[in-house]
């Protein structure tokens, strides 16, 4: 039976202002980023990944990370997170009082070398150094396993391999885990298998899944994860974003499409869907191009239309 194990409440985490904006061809002005994040803070999101404390040379579009993080208005019910690539990035994030640091390593070592220029062991050694900096602070650390469902260079990653990486993350002291379909290679069956394995092994460790819609299976993969019992999902306003080190990769699953689907299924997200759609409607003018979200084009399924004049009453 569909949703036999689905949670009663699902948390939605917004990643557009980091994962989405980092790949945009034009720089989004700092004040407009802050205004967007402040609007997103008011509609029921569990977490917002605000920015990435990377080198401005590596990701020019996020060169204003500190200004954005210090400029936003913080809602006590929202976790404000940032991606951190190394110790210097961690120090900058801690100076800005981030609630959560996100550390990322790809399950596919080839992708990790392309993306981070590090082997697995090099990444893990760096993570240990970051964890030492976080000790004694209130900042939590989330470990993301990128390409957990497939590497564009190595192919599908086994459940055993991904779970071994998760075990290393937890041994280092990370507080929560994200399994990311960075390249949009996942299938619902594969998602169910990995999520079931994770929740059976670590029922008390917070788990988030992060899907891309590269091959049109993003929301189907959400259904599979829900049925396994996952209760936390990353998504991107308008469906923007995509990994620059994954050939052919396109955007994340769309936040308003995801929330609309869950609402249609009677699953509570705590989100104000109408307010979310209103924010998404302003996104194309902000980024300067159309976005792939479907609800923006078609409207909600509950939005009815007047009876055609040619149809008798």
Image (cartoon, grey):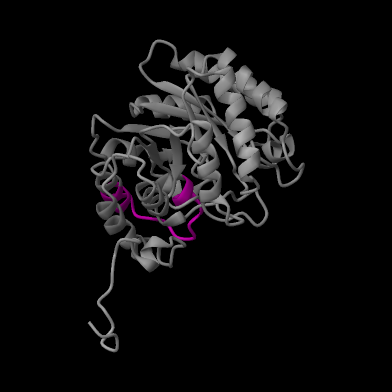
Residue 19 appears in the rendering:
yes
- Residue 15 lies, in percent from the top left, at 43, 44
User: Which residues lie in the magenta part?
Assistant: 19-36
Return the residue found at the far bottom. 310
Residue 11 in the image: above or below residue 129: below
Q: Position of residue 59 (x, y in %)?
A: 51, 46
Residue shown at the point (77%, 41%) measured from the top left:
154
State left or right for residue 197 relative to residue 176: right
Q: Position of residue 236 (x, y in %)?
A: 43, 49
Q: Nearer the viewer, residue 295 or 83?
A: 295
Residue under the image location 42 percent in, 34 percent down: 82
Depicted 98 relative to depicted 41: above or below: above
**Percent from the top left, x then y, of residue 305?**
28, 73
Residue 50 part of the magenta-drawn span? no
Taking the image as shown, residue 275 lies to the left or right of residue 110, namely: left
Q: Residue at x 64, y 26 (%)?
A: 123
What residue occupies the far front of the structure in this picture?
Answer: 313
Name the chief secondary structure element in magenta.
helix
């Amino acid at each position: 039976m569909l949703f036999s194990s689905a949670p009663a409440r699902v948390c939605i985490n917004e990643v557009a202002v980091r994962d989405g904006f980092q790949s945009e061809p034009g720089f989004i002005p700092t004040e407009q980023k802050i205004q967007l994040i402040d609007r997103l803070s008011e509609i029921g999101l569990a977490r917002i990944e605000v920015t990435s404390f990377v080198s401005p040379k590596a990701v020019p579009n996020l060169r204003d990370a500190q200004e954005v993080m210090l400029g936003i208005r913080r809602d006590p019910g929202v976790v404000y997170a940032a991606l951190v690539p190394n110790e210097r990035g961690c120090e900058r994030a801690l100076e800005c009082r981030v609630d959560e640091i996100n550390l990322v390593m790809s399950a596919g070592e080839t992708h990790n070398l392309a993306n981070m220029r590090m082997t697995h062991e090099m990444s893990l050694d760096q993570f240990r150094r970051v964890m030492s900096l976080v000790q004694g602070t209130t900042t939590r650390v989330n470990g993301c396993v990128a390409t957990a469902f497939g590497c564009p260079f190595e192919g599908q990653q086994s459940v055993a391999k991904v779970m071994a990486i998760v075990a290393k993350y937890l041994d280092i002291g990370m507080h929560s885990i994200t399994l990311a379909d960075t390249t949009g290679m996942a299938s619902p069956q594969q998602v169910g298998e990995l999520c079931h394995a994770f929740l059976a092994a670590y029922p008390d460790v917070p788990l988030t899944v992060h899907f891309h819609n590269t091959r049109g299976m993003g929301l189907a993969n959400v259904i599979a994860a829900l049925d396994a019992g996952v209760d936390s999902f990353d998504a991107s306003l308008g469906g923007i974003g995509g990994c620059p080190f994954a050939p052919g990769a396109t955007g994340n699953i769309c936040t308003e499409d995801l929330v609309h689907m869950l609402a249609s299924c009677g699953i509570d997200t705590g989100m104000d869907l109408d307010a979310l759609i209103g924010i998404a409607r302003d996104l194309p003018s902000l980024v300067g191009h159309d976005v792939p979200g479907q609800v923006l084009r078609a409207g909600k399924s509950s939005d009815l239309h007047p009876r055609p004049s040619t149809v008798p009453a």
